[in-house]
Amino acid sequence: MVDSQYYLPNDIGVSALHCGEAFHLLSPQEKMYAHYLSRAAWYGGLVVLLQTSPESADIFVLLQRIFRKQTPAQLEQVATAAGLSSEEYQDKLKALVRASQAFQDQPAEMEALWDSCSCLLYSLENKQKQLGLGDKGITTYFSGNCCLEDAELTQKFLDSKKLSAYNTRLFKKDSGEKACYEVRLASAVQKGQNCSECESCCGSFNFEDKEFTVKRGDYGPLMEKVCSYLQQAQTYAANDNQRKMLEEYRRSFTFGSVDAHKEGSRYWIKDKGPIVESYIGFIESYRDPFGSRGEFEGFVAVVNKAMSERFARLVSSAEVLLPELPWPKEFEKDTFLKPDFTSLDVLTFAGSGIPAGINIPNYDDIRQSEGFKNVSLGNVLAVAYATQKEKLTFLEEEDKDLFIKWKGPSFEVQVGLHELLGHGSGKLFVQDDNGKFNFDQSKMMNPETGEVVSSWYRGSETWDSKFTTIASSYEECRAECVGLYLCLNKQVLSIFGHEDKDAEDVVYINWLSMVRAGLLGLEFYTPESKSWRQAHMQARFVILRVLLEAGEGLVGLKEVTGQDGKPDARITLDRSKIHTVGKNAIHRFLRKLQVFKSTADVEGGRALYDNYSTVDNGGAHDFLRLRETVLLRKEDRKMFVQANTRVSGDSVELVEYEGSAAGLIQSFTERFQDDAEQLEADLLALRKRDAPCWC
């Protein structure tokens, strides 16, 4: 039997992400600024197609061409006339493609498109059904002949050249007996235009008896569109920080310079409390199997003033709350850099998914010494975490009403703590290229061993480049633990308006949510490759294991038979032991996570994290069997329909759509309608150029 995780129901939830109220309060200048930033984000977001799998771009173009010609309602009529029932209309894609007007108009081209992606679209071959490196899955961050050793060698090369992997892809070519590696930088230009930091790194190099070539020009046509829209947005910027920020982003995407993007991020940090907030670039490394390359992402959002006020109070309390964390003060940053922390309603979020909160930039050197921003996405929280009682799984009946009542408020607290004091806390011990330490290496004691610290980051080494494949999930786990730990603080709960019995209910549901999320996370574990496919889900499973290990009846997890006669499970949490047994367990584990991170102890950190990440049938719980139950009972995640903006004369109009599959489709066909044919040609050309690399 094939895992049900590879199937989606026809009635999957689709919700509109409303932002009209916030958008209509913007000034004409702010609306124009938001519009052009959104255009940049959407065109850049198409890069994700080329970062995911060989067939992704072809699937996108195939669907765009079909739905540009006919709406879903019109296509249903065509399908019915072709003899398909309403259910078959949603399932039998091949027949629908051939019955479509787009196919009638261009049969040869549409047939070629279908042939290029149809087998891979439905393939459940182990290598083709999931993201992974080498034999573990598919990724277009690396050519198909790359393995973990190639990724590790290339990381060493990049470190030696002081190059970030964030905006790169790696292609391996065999030249006789000698392997050659091509590192591509994402940029609008390939050559001929001077950029000092890029020209110095581009070219051919010999490293450890291997040949490396560094080139610009990856995703060129898309990067060109991003730069064009950012230039138009500059005209409507509110201040110099925004203008300089966008100028540096343009330089980054034009020439492939991560240094320019870092400089733009510095201006972004200085732009405190903007009405229209945005960030764009190669940012999160969750979906790189090696953990170093960033997926393109861009968002534009408008401030939610009421919720932002609560987060501002949390920021003001940070210096009081940080010493509560379970590591010595020497392991905390020398000075807490108060971030800008706002709640926003999303207008645009282009990428592979929409998070509930963000802590950026991800550049360690900037976060450590210059600061960062925290963003909570209020309208995402409101839609994504709304739950129907009848769909709540794995909880006792007496917990369900309380869960529904407090899930949203408790998650708001968790997001705030996770982003601000989770990702925003902790010091990295560093020795720079000049030999200077940011700590006293002769006296700094490791609280786990009682001995002097013996490891640290050197030169251009970063958290991602050292901890590679576990870095993202490990850091998410650390941030989640900080949220659990500090939500026990009455001052924190009061900031969010929770007192007395309500405050205790918020704590209980926050911890219960985490335990349940750890069980639900098993959906994202692949037994065949013994690998996790989602950083946050792995993190939550690890926390579940830690709390189960605490014992004393804190957490219960048992397999039962459901009312339908099929396997089920129940989780329980003893709320009377959260402040004692639970807090002590998180205290011990969180301190270990931070110490290994601070000291660059990859061996110790990996051993700890891999141990708790293990999914097997040994011990008190058969997690492999529980995984089957989770897949059987899973509730599919919602899909979001986002608005579009369009310029009409001197003003900008917001175009919103219904929360349905038809609304989602319409939003995408209208989003790229101005230059659809050229855009599709560019995507297909980029895919075709690299097609031999995935064989």
Image (cartoon, rainbow, N blue to C red):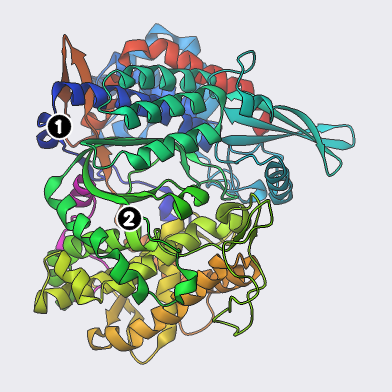
Residue 339 covered by magenta stretch: no
Residue labelled with disc 1: 23
Q: Which mark is residue 379?
A: none
Q: In the image, residue 606 lies at what x, y percent?
A: 60, 67
**Mark 1, other Cα within 10 Å: few <14 / some 14–19 / many ≥20:** many
Residue labelled with disc 2: 338
Placement of the C terminus among the 4 image quadrants: top right
**Mark 2, other Cα within 10 Å: few <14 / some 14–19 / many ≥20:** some
**Residue at 45% of width from left, 24% of height from top?**
250
Image quarter for residue 635? Answer: bottom left
Q: In the image, residue 494 lies at what x, y percent?
A: 14, 70
Q: Which region is colored magenta? A: 376-396
Tell me how many marks there are.
2
Q: Residue furthest bottom?
A: 552
Q: In the image, residue 258 lies at what x, y percent?
A: 54, 35
What's the amino acid at mark 2? Lys
Position of residue 580 relative to residue 327, above or below, is below
Q: In the image, residue 608 lies at what x, y percent?
A: 56, 73
Label 2, secondary structure: give it.
loop
**Residue at 28% of width from left, 88% of height from top?**
577
What's the amino acid at mark 1? Phe
Position of residue 261 relative to residue 529, above or below, is above
